[in-house]
Amino acid sequence: MDNEKRLGYDKEFDRWYAYDGCDLGATCTPARTVFKLWSPEAKRVELFLYRDDTSEAYGRQALKLGGRGVWSLAVEGDLHGVYYDYVVETAAGEARTADPYAAACGCNGARSMAVNLARTDPEGFGTDCPPPASPARVIYELHVKDFSYDPDSGVPAQYRGKFKAFSWKDGDGRPPLCVEHLKSLGVTHVQLLPIFDFGSVDEAGDGRQFNWGYDPVNYNVPEGSYSTDPADGAARIRECKEMIQALHQNGMRVVMDVVYNHTYASDSWLERSAPGYYYRRWEDGSLSNGSGCGNDMASGRAMVDNYILHSVMYWAREYHIDGFRFDLMGLLTVELMNRIRWSLDAVFGPGEKLVYGEPWRAADSPMEPGAAPAVRGNAARLDPEIAMFCDLTRDAIKGDCFHGEQPGFVNGGSGLGETILCAAAGWTGGVGDFRPRACSQVINYISAHDNYTLWDKLALCAGGTPSYQEYRDDLAAQNKLAAFIMFTCQGNVFFQAGEEFGRTKLGDANSYRSSPEINMLSWERAWRFGGLTDYYRQLIRLRKALPGLCDRSPEAGKRIKEGTVHRDGVVSFQVEGGGPCGQLLFVVYNATGHDYAIQLPHGRWTVRADGADADQHRPFISQNNWANVHPRSGMLLMRSAIT
Ligand code: CA
């Protein structure tokens, strides 16, 4: 096939060559290992075998071309722990490549490893299962290294910043401080920043290097720098499974942050095994850059979509992953996202696995003809159980995330009352290009790994020298009110690890490769800001107790009644059937610096939350049902009787 043709892979090509089998890679049993590589334009594919991660090859054998561009070879004997790579010869020349479908690899992922996956299971993994699903979805975004890098985490030095920190226990069977903290929050899901093998951290380094990890190298292998031995291909798999098992045992489900929109380098294993196929190109042959990271995977082509779907299903089955957060989902197609949703539903049960993502992209990208991007404007074409990060909620509550000093509702912004009411109703009325099919499609959040932490943003907006390190009552009150709003909106709730104790990155708005000290969770701070954490714990309990706040049906928005902007900075609304027995809820947000008196509808009321305690049961006693809401605080009341 000539070069011009290769730049324009089309449906005709896919009709001839797309392969639907799930056996690409190395299938390793005690009797033999079968190697299969999809490389439709190769003239020759040769397998090289190695005793370990660094030695010279001890064997080489040619693969045979079968149907649909699949090259294969069976090697007799038990190859578990044997390393391998390929030489692929195409019209573009000869390339050495690791296996893009590999389930295991050595240090820095340059060599693949044959692995008998049953031998990587930790004890009890066969019966591992997630805790029961909760109607309230509260997702906690956590980076493996951030979690335990701080010596105050209570994790022994050799396990700090690693998968092992999650599963380690002391001689008395007690988990470290950081795990105790996580357990005590009550979040339903932990979303881990990339744990697949990424390229930006040297696995042979001294452990001081830091990166978020949005730069995939081996999609189906855990990251080596989080394991105790990156050169042993089985260690990272076992330790990653131990982490997931430990999180399940501690009552949390596990969501994986997946980056199928681009790869670390455009000269990836995918590119080397099928040159030109996996990435989008402009007409002039140059790579598109809708990811802002140098290349875009060509979702919409059959084998790209098969690859991504296979990878998702693999992590769900093999590692018991409970959900997937798609980075720059707007670069993937609506068709693929629905296919992933429905495939997960078919195997694991409807809605059992979470699927959500960023409904945007960094720049334009040439999609396949007829393909629709999974962006916010296409919410109506996506399954109702594919959710989207809602930057509208985020920016309304605390201010624009790109303009540090621009305030939001809780810290002095004006004219935001109506927007806050839209957020409370889960955006079901629709605004602009965002018309969600149901609240299930909405992820409300006020901070994530990108941009300023919530505390830093509030400190910047307060003017003067930002109070990053020191606790300040006024900032804490803003923080509490911001969380109060987020936890009383319809939709799913998401927050960045450490938001509950005023996490600071000292004003660093993009810490993707900053020092581990800037990024790590400070457990001294967690202790010092403990009152704020208590407030988050109460909000989580409150939300779990009020099913009407977590209604994911298309009707959820209709529960929100009597939305009123009383004055700039004061908003109230009612939630019909919000309580556990269908009671009416009354919610007020007072972002002003003054008390605000508001009259409740008739009936007897119980205060369930205010600025001091977000999980209480205090009879509300007042003349004529006037409620006084303190400055910079929220109040939630539940009607206990109509008369
Ligand atoms: Ca790596």
Image (cartoon, helix red, strand yellow):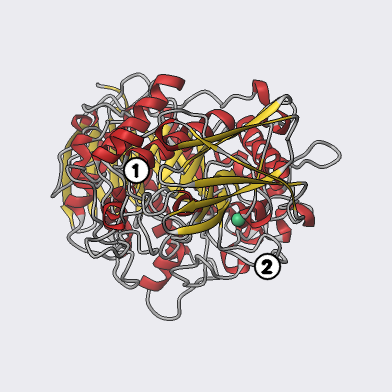
Label 1 amino acid?
Answer: Ile
Say if residue 621 shows up in the picture: no
Mark 1 and mark 2: span between their CA atoms? 33 Å
Q: Is residue 455 left or right of residue 488?
A: right
Say if residue 579 shows up in the picture: yes
Residue 62 in the image: above or below residue 497:
above
**Foreground: 324 or 148?**
324
**Foreground: 490 or 143?**
143
Picture disc at residue 208: 2
**Foreground: 264 or 586?**
264
Crowding around mark 2 (Cα neighbors within 10 Å: few <14, some 14 to 19, many 20+) is: few
* Residue 269, image x, y percentages: 51, 52
Q: In which quarter of the image is ligand 1?
A: bottom right
Q: Which residue is drawn at 30% across and 29% down?
A: 552
Residue 288 in the image: above or below residue 196:
below
Residue 319 in the image: above or below residue 94:
above
Find numbered disc 1 in the image and state the secondary structure of the residue it sits on.
strand
Q: Name the residue under label 1.
A: 443
Mark 2 vs ligand 1: CB below 8 Å: no
Q: Which of marks 1 and 2 is in front?
A: 2
Quadrant showing the C terminus: top left
**Foreground: 326 or 218?**
218
Picture disc at residue 399: none
Q: Which residue is drawn at 42% across and 30% down?
A: 67
Find numbered disc 2 in the image and state the secondary structure of the residue it sits on.
loop
* Residue 335, image x, y percentages: 27, 36
Label 2 amino acid?
Answer: Arg
Residue 217 in the image: above or below residue 468:
above
First along the sequence among labels 1 and 2:
2
* Residue 339, image x, y percentages: 33, 31
